[in-house]
Amino acid sequence: MATVDVIIPAFNAARYLPFAIESVAAQTFDDWHIVLVNDGSTDNTDEVIAPFLDRFGAKITCITQENRGLPAARNTAIRAASSEFIALLDADDVWTPCRLAESLKVLRERPKAGLAYGLVTLIDPGGQIERTWAGNLRHSEGRIASHIYMRKIELPCPTITFRRRCVDEVGCFDETMRSTEDRDLWLRIALRHEVAFVPKVLAYYRRSPGSMSTNAQRMFEAQLQFIRKHYGAKGCGLSARQISLARAYKQRAEALKEQNRPGAALRSALRAVATCPVDFDNSRTAASLLLNWTRSLIRRS
């Protein structure tokens, strides 16, 4: 049995999947096993996978199922996993060679930590580097459940490694959530365990047009579901709820700006200010979007 199971859900990602799998093969830590779930792909994913099945043999397991969505595909992989540790990798992302070694090192050094994460570098669909996410060092690790709830800290999926026993305790991904299901699971683990942080870039996260994260309203509704679900848990009281809700409005505003909808973006930013006026970051965002909206009116006049 391998030390770590690498779970890779794949839906119509044949273009990128080879890069993801090759990044696992390039790990400096080689006691891994891949559980790949083809979630009802209609492209040539099967053809892309075939050479890797021949090449890796028992080090890779491929499961094909009808399309059920990302949370369900990940859960299928988790149920098929048997290792002590589980590491996440989406089909369009890429790991750095030290990814597994660094993650397992910090988890072994910190037995009270249920999961570990690190930094990511954002890349465009063609693989060109955009920027590196620097994280939030102030709330990076330890008992940070409330900060996860308030969205004061991000835990990028391709850097996540967790102990198998943690999902045995709290359950797998919530399949009723078609987005933010990852944050939901991290919070459930963090409510029981410490979180460990690796201050290194562990993965390249691909930003793709048309992904769920670019659908402003869908992401916002998912965040509301997340906020409601965990309201009242330890550290997730009224004040934390208001901060989390304001950040959801702010994120929607920023997404609407990218979609060239300045009026809608400004309205969402103002809702963030009204929800949590003491967070000056909300006011700065609203002021910036007010200027952007004013300029759009001038250009149209």
Image (cartoon, rainbow, N blue to C red):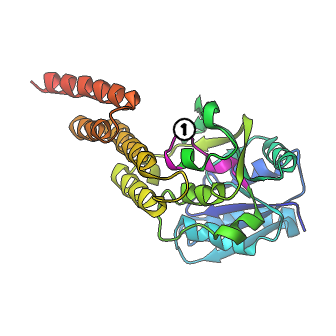
Secondary structure under tag 1 reads loop
- Residue 215, given in percent of the width and then of the height, sits at 38, 51
Q: Is residue 88 left or right of residue 111?
A: left
Q: Is residue 256 above or below residue 295?
A: below
In the image, residue 42 lies in the stretch drawn in magenta: no
Q: Is residue 44 above or below residue 234?
A: below
Q: Is residue 244 left or right of residue 36?
A: left
- The residue drawn where x is 59% and y is 50% is 145
Amino acid type at circle 1 is: Asp
Kindly indicate the quadrant of the structure image that contains residue 76. Answer: bottom right
Q: Which residue is mark 1?
A: 124
Toward the viewer: 84 or 28? 84
In the image, residue 156 lies in the stretch drawn in magenta: yes
Q: Quadrant of the C terminus?
A: top left
Q: Quadrant of the N terminus?
A: bottom right
Q: Is residue 81 left or right of residue 120?
A: right
Q: Which residues are magenta?
A: 149-161
- Residue 50, given in percent of the width and then of the height, sits at 74, 67
Residue at the farthest left position? 301
- Residue 114, given in percent of the width and then of the height, sits at 74, 55
Q: Is residue 144 above or below residue 123?
A: below
Q: How many other residues sit within 10 Å of disc 1, few (<14), some (14-19) or many (≥20)? A: some
- The residue drawn where x is 22% and y is 28% is 293
